[in-house]
Image: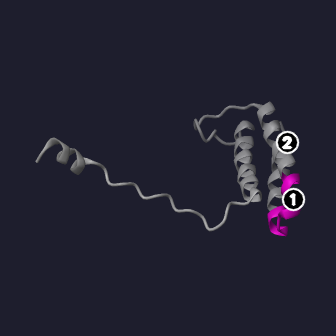
Amino acid sequence: MSDNEKKDDEKEPAQEAPKLLDKPIKVKEIVYMTILSLESKAWAYLDLVAHPETQKHQKDTQEARAAIDAIDALYKVIEADLSTDEKKDIQVRLTNLKLNFAKE
């Protein structure tokens, strides 16, 4: 077997192309996921849970306030496109964050 044949045999099999979606993800869904991410950060910066990235506790009320305000603003952007259950879910999450922030 020549060196060229060996190299061809040793090549990795072609990776399968990623599966495409039938339709693009709506902005509402991306914003909703962003709200959930910001909620996680807010809880961590309120020092009520460990930070997901470090698993350490670190309180920073300015960062918590920024996350809460961002959630509030993003909610207003997609509110008209949300179902009643989705609206209630975000409102409950936001209220819980605001109440816990007020305790600080």
Q: Which residue is mark 2?
A: 69
- Residue 29 picture quarter: bottom right
Is 49 positioned to the left or the right of 69 in the image? left
- The rendered magenta stretch, by its main secondary structure, is classed as helix
Residue at point 78%, 37% (across, down)? 64
Residue 71 locus on image (x, y percent) = 81, 47
Asked if residue 80 is among those painted magenta in the image, a careful observer would answer yes
Rendered location of residue 54, percent (x, y):
58, 35
| SS at badge 2 | helix
**Does 96 appear in magenta?**
no
Location of residue 22 with respect to 28 vertically, above or below: below
Q: Residue 44 appears in which quarter of the rendering?
A: top right
Circle 2 residues within 10 Å: few <14, some 14–19, many ≥20: some
Three-letter code for the amino acid on which mark 2 is drawn: Asp
How far apart, in angstroms, are the residues tagged by discs 1 and 2?
Answer: 15 Å
Sequence-earlier tag: 1 or 2:
2
10 Å neighbourhood of mark 1: few (<14), some, or many (≥20)?
some
Question: At x 82% / y 43%, what residue is drawn?
Answer: 70
The residue sitting at 58% across, 38% down in the picture is 55
In the rendered image, the residue lying farthest to the left is 1
Q: Amino acid at mark 1?
A: Glu
Along the line of sight, which residue is nearer the eye, 10 or 74? 10
Q: Is residue 19 above or below residue 50?
A: below
- Residue 79 is labelled as 1
Where disc 1 sits, the SS reads helix
> How many labels sit on residues?
2
| Image quarter of residue 24 | bottom right
Write the residue at 77% across / 33% down: 63
The residue stretch that appears in magenta: 75-88
